[in-house]
Amino acid sequence: FPLILGTFILFWVYRDFDFSRAADVFLHQMSWWWMFFTLIFGILSHVFRGIRWKQTLEPMGYVPKTNNCINAIFISYAANLVLPRVGEVSRCGILTKYNGIPFAKSLGTVVAERMVDTFMVVFITGITIVLQLGVFRRFFLRTGTNIDAIGDVFSSMTFWIVLMCIVGIGLLLYYLLRSLTFFQKVKGLALNVWEGVRTLKHVRNMPLFILYTLLIWLCYFLQFYLAFFSFGFTSNLSFLAGMVMFAAGSIAVVVPTPNGAGPWHFAIITMMCIYGVDVMNAGIFALLVHSIQTLLVVILGVYGLAILPFTNKK
């Protein structure tokens, strides 16, 4: 389903696109030096994430090899291209295989990481909306999003009645199923996951954890923003324009498609058009940048799979 959804959205976005123009820009007009810098920051973001992940495992008494954590991150992002979010499972399985770390506990640390990442997305988006509110209003108008209608849904009595019914059904199922053996196994798994989540507040060097988090998101932003200078038609876009498009792209990748393919292209093209970039050039930027960065993810994933058996020989 994620693959079909992404393909459908890409087909719709690029239905009238001149791919020969994109090939010409790729071969003759794109600055590979700037694109090379974006790839460096793409690699660094994974490295910092792997080191930060090791920090969250240490409070439980597990100290895996740093390169195992980093290579597991490489593989997880490549796995997400096949099926979104399966990478989070795969990287926990890698540490279980090579370092004997219980799967559920490492999965809990991944959940904690995602909570931090969600906070960062909300924080970055909030700041960007405040600084560029007019641009986001034009974006919502262009995409046909009615903000007032969304607000009315959450303020309506029907929404809260439905929510209370869902909570009530959940509580009823809990009391009906808690005596079953299967439920006890699931409960034990959930408790192990929760133990992994709780490690977040027991990280030994919290300032360093925060620094790694900031470095991860700085690398994400620079990987995207520096790509502007790879093309003549985007090199004049401002830092704030980069912030706006980065925030929009970060929200778009929530849609479950491989590496955000489709929704990310739509968000970036729409935002670029608001900033005065021609729709054809915006489509070229989104297509080439996403394709090159996706290829990097594949290469790093293959490297991680190939190197792990050699770096873990006993």
Image: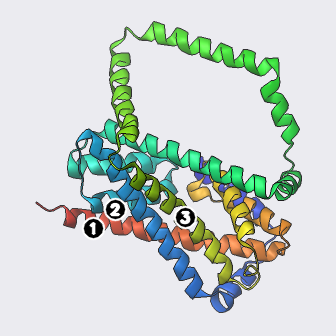
Image location (x, y in percent) of residue 190:
38, 27
The residue that disc 1 covers is 307
Count residues near mark 2 (Cα–Cα under 10 Å), then give few for <14, some for 14-19, many for 20+: many
* Residue drawn at x 65%, y 86% as measured from the top left: 30
N-terminal of the pair, mark 1 or mark 2, is: 2
Q: Position of residue 211 (x, y in %)?
A: 45, 58
Question: Residue 69: image x %, image y %?
Answer: 32, 57
The C terminus lies in quadrant: bottom left
Q: Earlier in the sequence, mark 3 or mark 1?
A: 3
Helix, strand or loop at mark 2:
helix
* Residue at x-position 24% and y-position 49%: 97
Q: Is residue 108 left or right of residue 232?
A: left
Mark 1–mark 2 contact, CB under 8 Å? yes
Q: What is the distance, in whole Å, between disc 1 and disc 2 at their CAs?
A: 8 Å
Residue, disc 3: 218
Nearest the camera: 199 or 3?
199
The quarter of the displayed image where residue 246 is located: bottom right
Q: Which residue is mark 2?
A: 71
